Amino acid sequence: KQEVTQIPAALSVPEGENLVLNCSFTDSAIYNLQWFRQDPGKGLTSLLLIQSSQREQTSGRLNASLDKSSGRSTLYIAASQPGDSATYLCAVDGSSNTGKLIFGQGTTLQVKP
Amino acid sequence: NAGVTQTPKFQVLKTGQSMTLQCAQDMNHNSMYWYRQDPGMGLRLIYYSASEGTTDKGEVPNGYNVSRLNKREFSLRLESAAPSQTSVYFCASSEDWSSYNEQFFGPGTRLTVL
């Protein structure tokens, strides 16, 4: 059974710092991996989607990498800002390729001014 | 575009009551999904509809039913609510079920069952 883990559960950094969020999964047979952002009391916003054949995706200050063989993905946030404070979730589309996402529990990021 | 909308935003039920959570999307997406989010458990898939006219069970379907009313709308029904169904429910949609398409989420419904 696919399991997705995100460590750490919470992270606090000063503004301007570059940071890395980690996501690991137990079954490397995935079709894609998505990173989402969730603000308190809100829904999820898709940040980046990496296909299984890709190594990384970039959007603005965000860069996500994928290493299927090791079962790991990282989300790199450059020059963090207080507005980046949120919970970041990763999810994998497992081997059934049905769009059924399996989520990690998230990393709650606080960026201090 | 409103994206994915959900009603109601909040609901309190007593044990044994029934209710239907409504979801609609205006992006002409084929696939729709229902998740629940619980502290310490993350988001878990309840049911999904890969295309209009089809539905299938996800990870935690017990106690729920769904209806794909048309291409736009996908409802989730609790026939006899239980305290264990207290959760935040999210609806999502994607262009189709293929691996190329990201999922877009609604704002959620916060349900409390007393």
Image (cartoon, grey):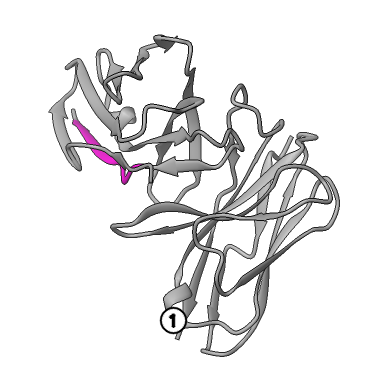
Q: Is residue A110 above or below residue B62?
A: above
Q: Which residue is mark 1?
A: B83
Give neighbour class at mark 1: few <14, some 14-19, many 20+ (Cα, 10 Å): some
Position of residue A111 measured from the top left corner of the image (x, y, whole percent): 21, 30
The residue closer to the viewer here, B56 or B3, is B56
Chain under disc 1: B
Q: Specify the amino acid type for callout 1.
A: Pro
The residue closer to the viewer here, B68 or A37, is B68
Q: Residue at x 38, y 46 (%)?
A: A1
Q: Residue at x 56, y 64 (%)?
A: B61
Q: Which residues are magenta?
A: A104-111
Position of residue A8 measured from the top left corner of the image (x, y, whole percent): 17, 37
Position of residue B33 measured from the top left corner of the image (x, y, whole percent): 63, 49
Q: Is residue A43 above or below residue B83?
A: above
Residue B42 within the magenta-colored segment of the rendering: no
Residue A106 within the magenta-colored segment of the rendering: yes
* Element carrying mark 1: helix
| Residue A16 in the figure: left or right of residue A31 | left
Position of residue B77 measured from the top left corner of the image (x, y, whole percent): 67, 71
| Residue B69 in the figure: left or right of residue A26 | right
Instruction: Quadrant for residue A106, please give it.
Output: top left
Q: Residue at x 29, y 18 (%)?
A: A77
